[in-house]
Image: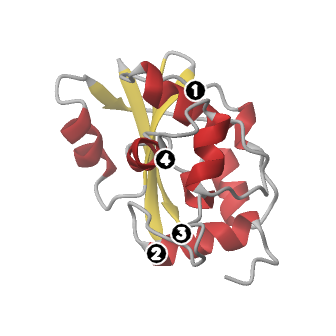
Amino acid sequence: MIIYETMPFLQRQLTVFKQDDAVVFVSLADDGRQEFLEDYPTATIQAGYVPELDLFRRYAAGEPVDFRAIKIDYLRATPFQRAVWTALHEMRPTETLTYSDLAERANYPKAIRAVATAVGKNPLTIINACHRILPKQGGIGKYAYGPDIKQVLLSLDIPENPR
């Protein structure tokens, strides 16, 4: 059984999914349940209490939060995706990387495009800081939930970020 809880978050909503004692999915979609079930159509989900939401509340309020402390797991991941997502999860709280930097950290230095694809499929947005992967040529790049929310997340992580 996977439990989920939804809360208002940065003029959107955030839905966090948890199985046993590990967070397995985070959504910023208007309907986080629907987004989750599109990826995991056979999963059984139920509304419930997810204590990790308190960390997201503190984060949205501008408090520094180290999401590396949250126990996570993946419902489905290839070894390659797991390596990329682990490298994302291990980033320091204010650190940004380029896709090539991340490829290096994941031990796939020549697989930059494949790393970018894995980043786009990250099931633990914010916790695995995919919003802090920036294009080498500058700018903030793409984000599954749009550039506006990516900019807000970057400003929470790196308040002096001029981007």
Q: Residue 150 shows which numbered tag?
A: 3
Residue beneath the point at 59% across and 64% down = 134
Which residue in the structure is indicated by mark 1? 72
Distance CA(mark 2)–CA(mark 4): 21 Å
Residue beneath the point at 24% across and 36% down = 39
Residue lying at the far bottom in this picture: please name it.
162
- Disc 1 + disc 4, Cβ < 8 Å: no
Which circle's residue, 2 or 4, is located before the other in the chain?
4
Distance CA(mark 3)–CA(mark 2): 5 Å
Which residue in the structure is indicated by mark 4? 112
Q: Splitting the image into 4 quarters, where does residue 61 fall?
A: bottom right
Distance CA(mark 2)–CA(mark 1): 25 Å
Q: Secondary structure at mark 2?
A: helix
Q: Amino acid at mark 2?
A: Pro
- Disc 3 + disc 2, Cβ < 8 Å: yes
Residue beneath the point at 39% across and 64% down = 145
Distance CA(mark 3)–CA(mark 1): 22 Å
Residue 85 is left or right of residue 12, and the answer is: right
Which circle's residue, 4 or 3, is located before the other in the chain?
4
Q: Where does the N terminus fall, quadrant-wise?
A: top left
Q: Amino acid at mark 1?
A: Ile
Q: Amino acid at mark 4?
A: Ile
Which circle's residue, 2 or 1, is located before the other in the chain?
1
Q: Secondary structure at mark 3?
A: helix
Nearer the observer, 69 or 138:
138
**Camera sees residue 52:** no
- Disc 2 + disc 4, Cβ < 8 Å: no
Q: Is residue 121 above or below residue 28?
A: above
Residue 53 is left or right of residue 94, and the answer is: left
- Disc 4 + disc 3, Cβ < 8 Å: no
Q: Secondary structure at mark 1?
A: loop
Q: Residue 147 shows which numbered tag?
A: 2
